[in-house]
Image (cartoon, coloured by chain):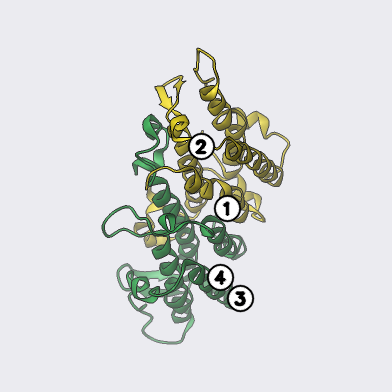
Chain colours: A yellow, B green
Amino acid sequence: MNYSIDKALEILEQTPKTLSSLLSNLSDEWVFCNEGKDTWSAFDVVGHLIHCENTDWIPRLKIILSNKDNKTFDPFDRFAQFENSKGKSLSNLLDEFQKVRAENLEYLKLLELSEAELGLKGMHPTFGEVSLKELLATWVTHDLGHIAQISRVMAKQYKNDVGPWTAFISILNT
Amino acid sequence: MNYSIDKALEILEQTPKTLSSLLSNLSDEWVFCNEGKDTWSAFDVVGHLIHCENTDWIPRLKIILSNKDNKTFDPFDRFAQFENSKGKSLSNLLDEFQKVRAENLEYLKLLELSEAELGLKGMHPTFGEVSLKELLATWVTHDLGHIAQISRVMAKQYKNDVGPWTAFISILNT
């Protein structure tokens, strides 16, 4: 497969529903468990995804499409969710994510980006020059990566309970 | 966390809905893509999960709880889905999975298993002696492992499109 906006939208549009299906109605033990010191829980990941919607994908797209001379992105804060999610429930976060994601996809669709526009460049603070297409393809893989991460974090809680099956469940050994 | 039936049910009950959210309405390119020769697509994984419902978790639980002298499980067929899913759509498979999973969880709940029963043993054809608790804990991690697998398989389709972001999206490098 090669990146296309239509196919990418299929994934991006489902992610809020997927996360709600995976996480709604779970006990706090599932929601707040992590993989050890300095690792993230499902709650942390959903907060991070909201912060990406607010400061990464569309804000960076806007920089790329702008007429500015300097198209360097603001550095991304990987720890913003620890402050931003304070006092909120997972249900609050899932609702918030659904809302900002829907707004961002609505905006993306209205742009009707051309192939030429997908080739426009911005400046990543670490990587240097990146294209709009690379940014938008990353959005999709980033969603899927975090769905996999949440699944892994929760699976690992039973690592000591599965006995010899550990050998067959590769996610427990990553 | 330690295994408990109530907490395990929270995950097991959500999996059909999670898979439907993740996979419904996707183009065939997403549904049938895989990671290369002899690897599985989302379509293959859902077929495998159905086969597990039909031949693994509850059938093996029944062997453990039976009065038979020989409590050796039948070997599991990892390739059954390639035959069983023929001629079906992903939508067929998702419906079938939802149905058999619901029936199996209904059965599990009716048993009201005690701690003593969770300690009963069966004989795995490869591992030897395993407990009912280990089997049931594996059921949960197996679900989560395959959700992560499907996410990884789909994410990798854009591996060549994300440019330098490959370095930040660890799922692309597994």
Whether residues under marks 1 and 2 lie with C-beta atoms below 8 angstroms apart, the answer is no
Q: Relative to the observer, which residue lies in front, A23 or B94?
A: B94
Residue A18, disc: 1
Marks 4/1: CA distance? 15 Å
Q: Are marks 4 and 1 on the same chain?
A: no
Q: CA distance from mark 3 to mark 1?
A: 24 Å
Q: CA distance from mark 4 to mark 3?
A: 12 Å
Q: Nearer the viewer, mark 1 or mark 2?
A: 1
Find residue A94 and report its horizontal and vertical position in percent: 66, 45
At a point 54% along the width and 26% down the height, the residue shown is A60
Quarter of the image holding residue B116?
A: bottom right
Give the label on residue B106, or none.
3
**Relative to A65, residue A24 above or below:** below
Q: Nearer the viewer, mark 2 or mark 4?
A: 4
Residue, disc 2:
A39
Label 3 secondary element: helix
Residue kind at label 3, given as amino acid type? Glu
Identify the amino acid type marked 1.
Thr
Q: Amino acid at mark 4?
A: Gln
Residue B156 appears left or right of A43: left
For disc 2, the chain is A
Q: Which mark is residue B98?
A: 4
Q: Tag 4, which secondary structure?
A: helix
Q: Are marks 3 and 1 on the same chain?
A: no
Q: Chain of mark 4?
A: B
Disc number placed over residue A74 in the picture, else none: none
* Towards the viewer: B61 or A111: A111
Q: Tags 3 and 2 in contact by the CB under 8 Å rule?
A: no
Q: How far apart, in angstroms, are the residues tagged by discs 1 and 2? A: 22 Å
Q: Residue flagged by tag 2: what amino acid is it? A: Thr
- Chain under callout 3: B
Q: Residue at x 38, y 44 (%)?
A: A2
